[in-house]
Image (tube, coloured by chain):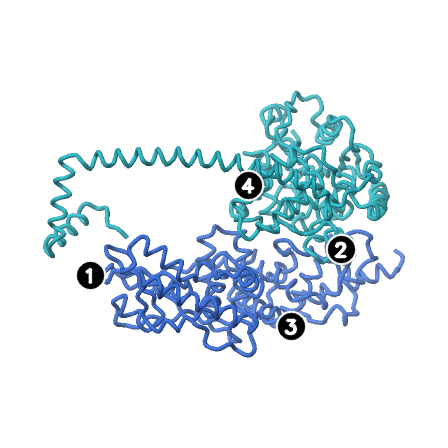
Chain colours: A blue, B cyan
Amino acid sequence: MTDTSAHAGERRAWGWLAHLREGGSTSWQDWDGAGVEGGPALPGAQQLELVRRLNAAGRPSPALVDRALTASAPGRGRPDLELVGAAAPSRFGPPPVDPGELSDDELLRVAAALLADDLVAAGVPAPRRPRVVRPWRTRYRLVGDPWLADPLRSELVARGRPPGGRGSVVLVSGTALDKMLEHAWIARAFSVGAPGWREWLDGLARRNRVAPSVDLLHTARTWSDRVGTDRVRIVLDQKAVPGLVGVRRGLPPPPDLAADAVDVARRVANVLGLLVVPPAREALLRETLLPRLREVTGERLAVPPEHAEWVRRRAERMRDGLLRAGYAVVGDPDLLLPRGSSAAATVPSDAGALALAVRLLLDEDRKGGTTR
Amino acid sequence: MSKRILLHVGTPKTGTSYLQDVLFRNQRVLAGAGVLYPADRFDAHFLAALDLMRLPWGGLETEAIGAWDRLAAQVRRHDGTSIVSHEIFATASRSQVGRALESLGAGEGAEVHVVLSVRDLVRQIPAEWQENVKHRSAISYARFLEQIRDPRRESRIATWFWGVQEIPYILQRWGHDLPPEHVHLVTVPPPGGAPEVLWKRFSQAFGLDGMDLDLEAERANPSLGAPETALLRRINRAANSVVDPADYRPLVRELLAHQTLSRRTRSPRLALPPDVHPWAQEVATSWVAEIEERGYDVVGDLADLIGPPPLTPWVDPDHPGEKRVAGAAVDAIRALLQEGSRLRQSEARLGAELDEAHRALERSYLRPTYRLRAKVVRRLQGGRAGRGLLGAYRRARGRSSRSA
């Protein structure tokens, strides 16, 4: 065999793969060792770089390394790419890349696929057994901001106080509109998946529309058409909820998550949609993934300053519309208005989300997660 | 009987819908000859492809969960020739190809053949842009061309386009572990040729010669002219934010594009701009050289890949003749009015049925026994004890007629 530079490049690549399999974290750029061909083809640059990041952050098992090396990124996007310098340049296919220059977003695509597999393998924890339904309970329905209402409803069901029943009062939960927009995106990330925070929010602002799930005026109107305006309450003071649903013990606040944690969830949700049916996806995200993300520290989401004026206008319109329609409001109607914009808006960062995804993969690997 | 698997993996816009329709409608005849086309609808393998490649597709992916494994199991069980066909398989990564071949039983003695039907880039490029527009895209033709010509290929459009169109790249992934004689290229004949030529080539590649198949075309993916595609793009820009994806497919893609605008066959056709034409032919020439070098089995003529000469005069779909666009728009409005009328008639019919149902319900309410029961319920609801009694009765009855 002639010792051409192409062959030298291939040997270097096989050597790097062996180095990564042994737990090494030297970058491709700095790698100068050599190895022998160990299979029909080298894994893609994204897969190799993800393994390097896993090695740099911990000690992944051989099973996790194998999974990472054979996982293709789901969905549309760049295909598995070749390593620059590993082989003679091909006239066909996308140009080879230095894996160190791949964007975090590219690596996150592969990591999200592995996390989704982990979630499916872990399954949903056994549901909390609800207490016997109390026949004398206060009749209510809890709707509105889904990130506020959903956990409260679940807690009440667990306490033997399911919603509905004759004469139920409809409680439309809400808070400042900027927070509700964050909640709407988070709730979507933990159900059907979502586009990125900015892409999603910019789209709403461009169309001058509030996300339907937190459009309190629309929700209130829908319910008042069914049960009458006198049975609809707009609840802006969350401390009043226990009294309104007839419980003495306090109710848990909604999960407060770091922006990067939500970003990981929405990426995983997008992949999970290809693996399980929608109800199972939501259960895996909210009951299996969410508890793992609660402890994640980091900046919380915030509406960027350039949308502050739009959010304020929409909030005023919502407040005025609710008052004009004559709904009873629990709490100060001005609570709908944003409470001053944060100087520096927080958007999820790809780097932060990737670091978190790597940590979650290693944690699950340590616990002996999927070996698919 | 020896096990043989024919994997038809692309490319789009090469008569694949027609082939899949013929295979689907002739499943019984094929089964008689030991050939399995395991499908419950003509494009059933689309869902399997989405599942294999974990591709979201406007919500359809939910129906695709497990579809690949089910298809692979059917193929593994069949002792004879099996055909799997869908054009989006072309974009599978090497590890997805490995998984596909393994699950089909390639390592267990099955003889695997890959079939790729191919058409010249001169026609494929405008056709792909049109497909983008028919899937809600508002990208201009110029921007589309710019993106696919960018050598970095980082945009979603370029990634997808070359993933499903670059023949040597597709076969690097699908034919990597196969002997070249197991890789078959079916070339689409040049425009203006006899329509049966393509089928003859498919038939030869799939070993269907001599079978008595019904070849009547029921499925086609008709193409649009330049002004019609321009109109559709304008509609996308104006209506994407107000038409849900679930409504877009029947109303815009099917009713407007396929059933209405595609009938305007006298409009100028979409084509490559004169300055892009030589580049496309140059790319195709390099492909032809590579295919010859790799020694694949070619059914047809590799010269077909070079494509026809430039269309003159060329019509720019980004700046179409406004008169023709207006003509297409009038046709579109007429079709939508007809559909609106049909829906109104349907609404009126359903309204009449609902009124009739209400009247029947009222007649039953007027029966003396119902009136007596209603009176008793009203009385009971008037007092605390009565309400308790009613509640107990309802719980004992075992179902709830309570309101929300």
Distance between mark 1 and mark 4 Cα atoms: 51 Å
Residue B332 percent coordinates (x, y): 60, 38
In the image shown, does B227 or B244 lie closer to the viewer? B227
Q: Residue at x 48, y 68 (%)?
A: A313
- Tag 4's secondary structure? helix
Q: Secondary structure at mark 1?
A: loop
- Gap in angstroms between the C-alphas marked 4 and 3: 52 Å
Which picture quadrant has residue B100?
top right
User: Label 1 lies in what chain?
Assistant: A
Earlier in the chain: of badge 3 and badge 1, it is 3
| Residue holding disc 3 | A56
Crowding at mark 4 (Cα within 10 Å: few <14, some 14-19, many 20+): some
Is the residue A167 above or below the residue B233 in the image? Answer: below
Query: Quarter-wise, where is residue B323 in the image?
Result: top right
Do pointers 2 and 1 mark residues of a single chain? Answer: yes
Name the foreground residue: B327 vs A347.
B327
Q: Which chain letter goes with mark 3?
A: A
Q: Nearer the viewer, mark 2 or mark 4?
A: 4
Q: Secondary structure at mark 3?
A: helix
Q: Would you name the residue on which mark 2 appears? A: A94
What's the amino acid at mark 2?
Pro
Give the numbered dot on residue B251. 4
Mark 2 chain: A
Question: Which circle, 1 or 4, is nearer the viewer?
Answer: 4
Mark 3, residues whose alpha carbon is within 10 Å: few (<14), some, or many (≥20)? some
Q: Which residue is mark 1?
A: A136
Cα separation between marks 3 and 2: 28 Å
Q: Residue furthest bottom?
A: A343
Residue sitting nearer the eye, A50 or B346: B346
Disc 3 versus disc 2: nearer the observer:
2
Question: What residue is rendered at 73% in x and 31% in y?
Answer: B205
Can you tell which of label 2 and label 1 is closer to the viewer?
1
